[in-house]
Amino acid sequence: MKLPRPAAPPEPDDAELFRREMRGVEPARPHNRALPRVAPPPPIPVKRLEDERLVLQELARLACPIDDIEIEEDHAFLRPGLPRDVIRKLRRSHWVVQDEIDLHGLTGDEAALRTAAFLADCGKRGLRCLRIVHGKGLGSRNREPVLKGRIRKLLARRAEVLAYAEPRASDGGSGAVIVLLEARS
């Protein structure tokens, strides 16, 4: 007959082992050194942002009230020297729309300012194909489109806009415009 083994003494826990090992140890004296400074956050270019905002406002103001640009075909615009099939490709969604903005509910000035800012932002990000939804003007006074003509004139004045076209009805029809921007290098 076997005798039961005596129970092993319990294992000390980690905290007890640490206290045993650190018995007699004194804390280190504080060092006489300056701690390195934490890097400050990057500066906010307030003046540059203000200048950009003012430029966009000026562009929007200049582009809209002047009616010297007559767009013969209100549903399309093509920069001189480009092949006509660019318009066809824009209408048929040949290029993927990379970003869009909806201008419903804005006044003419607000819409022009937002559009100018949107084009500048998309240019910085290297986007080429955009959709601008301006609406059909059904909520406007006399049910006439206010934003449609104003936005399209603004687009025709912008140097980075190569072409725009009214998309198919499923993509917005006469209440939107697909814009092709020049490539940025």
Image: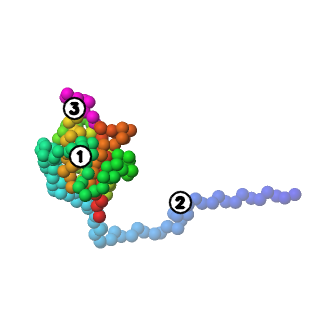
**Identity of the residue drawn at 34% across and 48% down:** 88
Q: Secondary structure at mark 1?
A: helix
What separation in Å lies between label 2 and label 1 (alpha carbons)? 65 Å
Camera-side residue: 77 or 132? 77
**Closer to the N terminus: mark 1 or mark 3?**
1
Numbered tag placed on residue 33 in the rendering: none
Amino acid, disc 2: Ala
**Identity of the residue drawn at 21% across and 55% down:** 159
- Range covered by the magenta-colored residues: 135-144
Amino acid, disc 3: Glu
- Residue 176 location in percent, x, y? 30, 41
What residue did someone put label 2 on?
15
Q: Secondary structure at mark 2?
A: helix
Residue 153 vs 135, above or below: the answer is below
Name the dominant secondary structure of the magenta segment: loop
Numbered tag placed on residue 115 in the rendering: 1
What residue did someone put label 3 on?
144
Amino acid, disc 1: Thr
- Residue 36 location in percent, x, y? 29, 68
For the residues carrying marks 2 and 1, which lies nearer the camera in this image? 1
Camera-side residue: 15 or 53? 53
Q: Residue 42 sits in which quadrant? A: bottom left
